[in-house]
Image (cartoon, coloured by chain):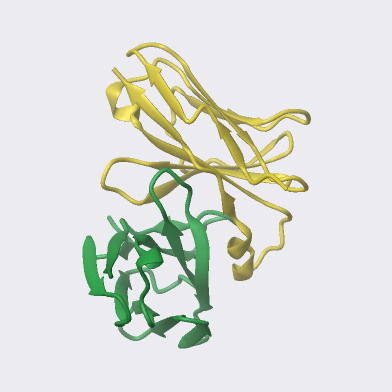
Amino acid sequence: NAGVMQNPRHLVRRRGQEARLRCSPMKGHSHVYWYRQLPEEGLKFMVYLQKENIIDESGMPKERFSAEFPKEGPSILRIQQVVRGDSAAYFCASSPWRTGGAGANEKLFFGSGTQLSVL
Amino acid sequence: DQQVKQNSPSLSVQEGRISILNCDYTNSMFDYFLWYKKYPAEGPTFLISISSIKDKNEDGRFTVFLNKSAKHLSLHIVPSQPGDSAVYFCAASGGGGGSQGNLIFGKGTKLSVKP
């Protein structure tokens, strides 16, 4: 019964390169959330996806960042032309259903994160 | 503009004593509050939560208190154990526009429980 799987655990990129972060939700979960944690900061919401749909991308930077959750395969967070300020821990979470209401947030299960370092 | 604030970056407590972690918020529309625990190199794990219509929720050694008038909540751990040493994040939801899963996190408090 695997949890939320993120890979790679560590990713090093040079400025201007592309970073692809992958997230496989828990079995039976069809909702995925991406969060970013900058050094000395709390986690900040980026995007909420359901299979093939972006539900809420209010936390995504307007440029260079994109996310998808295809019908088959993991969710991908893509960062184009990375800059040093993108260095952070990126966490993915999943939940089993869209329940609505406040209690739904208890059902978020987080992965161990991908630490992105931009040189 | 931090809507959820944890003003103590760190806290050190002796094993067996009470740990009290504090959290303040500014958005009166938050309707649900959660505490997450995070070990190094791992993702956050859900610990305990409280609805804004309640003022206390207890689960074993963990109790969360909510004071809506002061926009303040606290997490009490009694008795504290060395395994409780971790970073604790306070989070809130329902701030008037966020979707499911859109939580507002504080910066965290690093708790160290000394044997």
Q: Which quadrant: the C terminus of chain B?
A: bottom left
> Where is B32 relative to A65, above or below?
below
Q: Position of residue A37 (x, y in %)?
A: 37, 43
Judge whether residue B8 can be spotted in this image.
no
Q: Residue at x 42, y 55 (%)?
A: B38
Nearer to us in this view, B20 or A59:
B20
Nearer to us in this view, B107 or B32:
B107
Q: Position of residue A52 (x, y in %)?
A: 73, 33
User: Is A72 left or right of A18, judged from the image as shown?
Assistant: right
Nearer to us in this view, A78 or B14:
B14
> Where is B87 relative to A16, above or below?
below
Q: Residue at x 47, y 87 (%)?
A: B56
Colour representing chain A: yellow
Q: Position of residue B21 (x, y in %)?
A: 31, 73
> Where is B49 relative to B55, above or below?
above
Which image quadrant is residue A70 in? top right
Q: Which quadrant: the N terminus of chain B?
A: bottom left
Q: Residue at x 40, y 74 (%)?
A: B28
User: Is A115 left or right of B17, judged from the image as shown?
Assistant: right
Q: How many marks?
A: 0
Q: Position of residue B3 (x, y in %)?
A: 33, 62
Q: Residue furthest front?
A: B115
Which image quadrant is residue B19 in? bottom left
Judge whether residue A20 can be spotted in this image.
yes
Nearer to us in this view, A62 or A18:
A18
Q: Residue at x 41, y 11 (%)?
A: A17
> Where is B51 relative to A103, above or below?
below
Colour representing chain B: green
